[in-house]
Amino acid sequence: MAEPKRIGPFPRGMDNRRPDFKLALGREEGGGHLLRDALNVDVTAQGTVKTRAGYALAQAGGDCHSLWAPVEGDYALYVDDGNLYRIDSTKTLVAGGFGNVTPVRYAQVYEAVYFTDGLRVGSYHPITGPTPKWASTTATDIGDQVLVPMPAGQHIAHHAGRLLVAVGSAVIYSEPFTPHLRDEAKGFELFPAPITCLVAVEGGVFVVADKTYFIAGGFPAQAVRAVLDYGAPDQQPSYRDDGGAHWMSARGVVSCTAVGELSNLQEAHVAMSVEGYAATLMRESDGMRSIVAALTEQGNLGAGVGSYAQARIGKKGT
C-alpha cells in the first residue's frame, strides 16, 4: 500500500462546485485543499477542522418557534404553543394568541419591539419610553392628515423613523416618527411578487421578493434597484453589532454592511437551491464568529453534490 498522503489545511472550507479530484489548491491560490463536504465541524482561521460542540436543553416547551433577540442579546422573544414569551433567566408571558398558525416577525422600534404574525399586531415595551403601543385603533387626525393604523403583515422592519410592514407583495410604510400610523392614500410601494424578507440598515432597505431589491435611503422610494437576480426563503433577517445584517438567500448566505454593500458569502464555492423557511444567527465560539443557518427543506445543501455524483455514475455506466 502507498504511504498515506497528508491533506490540508482547508483555508476556504467547503466547495462542492469543483470535481472531487480537483480539491487541491495551487500555489497561486495559497496552497492547501478544499473540503468536499463539512458536517458538524468548524473550519478555523488557520484552516484546521474541529468538531462542533454538542447541545443541551435550555428551556422545555411545546410548539416553539419564532425566536428573536435584540442585537445586545439581553433577552429573547419566542412563541410556545401560541403564546409569546420573553426568556432570559426566567420565562415570562408577553402576549397571548400569537403564532398559532403563522410565524411571528419582530422589529426593534427605539426602546420597544413591534411584532406581528400576519393576523394581529402588538408591541413589547421592556422599559418606559416615548414609543407608542402598536394596536388596532381607529383613524387619527394629526394636523390636516387622517392617519390609519399600520396593518398586520408577514414581515416588518424599522428604518429612518418609519415602520415598514410587508403585506403580500406590498411594503406599507408609516409616517415619520409615528410608527403605528400611516397615510392610507400614499404610504405603500408594490413589488412584482410576495415579499419573503425585509432588511433595514442605515443606508437603505432590502426587499426580497422574486429578486432582491435595494431602496437606497428607504421609503418613500426614490429608486428601486435589483441587486440580486434571485430571492430568498421566508425568514426574519439577523442584525449585527457592526450595523450590518445577513440572511439565507436562495443561493446561500448573503451579508450586507451598514451602508448597504451586499455580498453572497457562499455562492462561489457552494451550490445550493434553498426554499421553504430559513433562519440565521451569529455564533461565537472559541474566538470564532460564524453565521449559522437553519432550513426547513431537507437536501438543499446537497444539490450541487448530488448533481455531480449522478453525472459520474451515468458516465461509468456507459
Image (cartoon, rainbow, N blue to C red):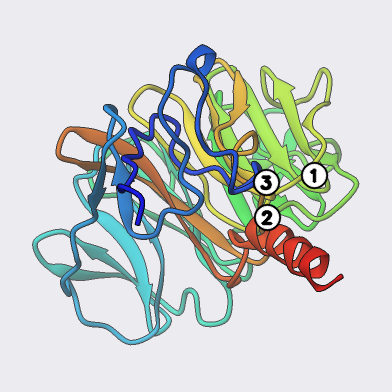
Spatial CA distance of label 2 from label 1 is 46 Å
The image quadrant that residue 31 belongs to is top left
Residue depth check, mark 2 versus mark 1: number of the one nearer the observer: 2
Image coords of residue 252 (percent x, y)? 60, 45
Please say if 97 is above or below 227: below
Q: Which residue is drawn at the image coordinates 71% and 57% (left, top)?
A: 308
Residue tagged 2? 304
Spatial CA distance of label 1 from label 3 is 36 Å
Q: Which residue is drawn at the image coordinates 67% and 64% (left, top)?
A: 306
Spatial CA distance of label 2 from label 3 is 11 Å
Q: Are marks 2 and 1 in contact (CB under 8 Å)?
A: no
* Label 1 element class: loop
Comes first in the chain, label 1 or label 3: 1
Image coords of residue 307 (percent x, y)? 74, 61
The image quadrant that residue 57 belongs to is bottom left
Residue tagged 3? 251
Comes first in the chain, label 2 or label 3: 3
Please say if 299 is above or below 141: below
Q: Are marks 2 and 3 in contact (CB under 8 Å)?
A: no
Few, some or many C-alpha atoms within 10 Å of disc 2 (few <14, some 14-19, many ≥20)?
some
Q: What's under tag 1, amino acid-wise?
A: Glu
The image quadrant that residue 203 belongs to is top right
Q: Nearer the viewer, residue 179 or 87?
A: 87
* Label 3 element class: loop
Please say if 198 is above or below 153: above
Q: Nearer the viewer, residue 55 or 270?
A: 270
Residue tagged 1? 184
Few, some or many C-alpha atoms within 10 Å of disc 1 (few <14, some 14-19, many ≥20)?
some
Comes first in the chain, label 2 or label 1: 1
Q: What's under tag 2, amino acid-wise?
A: Gly
